[in-house]
Amino acid sequence: MAATEKISITITKQMKESLDVYVASGAYASTSEVIREAIRNWQDDRWETPEQIAYMKRKVREAMDDSRPMITLEESKARFKLYAQSKKVAAR
């Protein structure tokens, strides 16, 4: 387990009551557990981490280096429409 550090936060009464409900329900062992999960979710939702930026740069580079010919958005939509129609026919 990573090293921990104790902090103090100020939240509204409604937030505290909400935390208490989750802990009382048994969904979480403590309010700290709820807060840790909320922070992990917040971190997961952010795309600004160095790892995520590096990943996106790699994906863009892969797309730019792709030797297949580029197609227009209209051509892409037409191809997808044909593909979707073929799947509908196959499902019958």
Image (cartoon, helix red, strand yellow):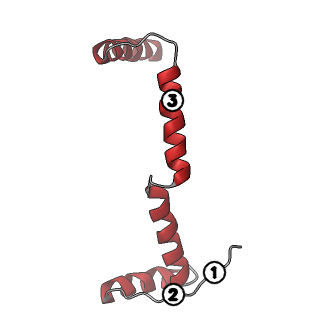
**Marks 1/2: CA–CA distance:** 10 Å
The residue that mark 2 highlights is 7
Residue 84, how many percent across, how many down?
Answer: 39, 18
The amino acid on which the numbered mark 2 sits, given as a three-letter code, is: Ile
For the point 46% across and 79% down, the residue is 22
Residue 13 sits in which quadrant? bottom left
Q: Residue furthest left?
A: 74
Q: Which mark is residue 4?
A: 1
Quick one: label 1, few (<14), some, or many (20+) residues within 10 Å? Answer: few
The residue that mark 3 highlights is 61
The answer to whether residue 88 is seen in the rendering is yes
Asked if disc 2 and disc 3 are in contact, CB closer than 8 Å, the reply is no
Q: Secondary structure at mark 1?
A: loop
Q: Which mark is residue 60?
A: none
Residue 1, how many percent across, how many down?
Answer: 71, 73
Residue 11, how many percent across, how many down?
Answer: 36, 86
For the point 68% across and 73% down, the residue is 2
The amino acid on which the numbered mark 3 sits, given as a three-letter code, is: Arg
Work out whether 35 lies above or below 68.
below
N-term-proximal mark, 1 vs 3: 1
Quick one: label 3, few (<14), some, or many (20+) residues within 10 Å? Answer: few
**Marks 2/3: CA–CA distance:** 41 Å
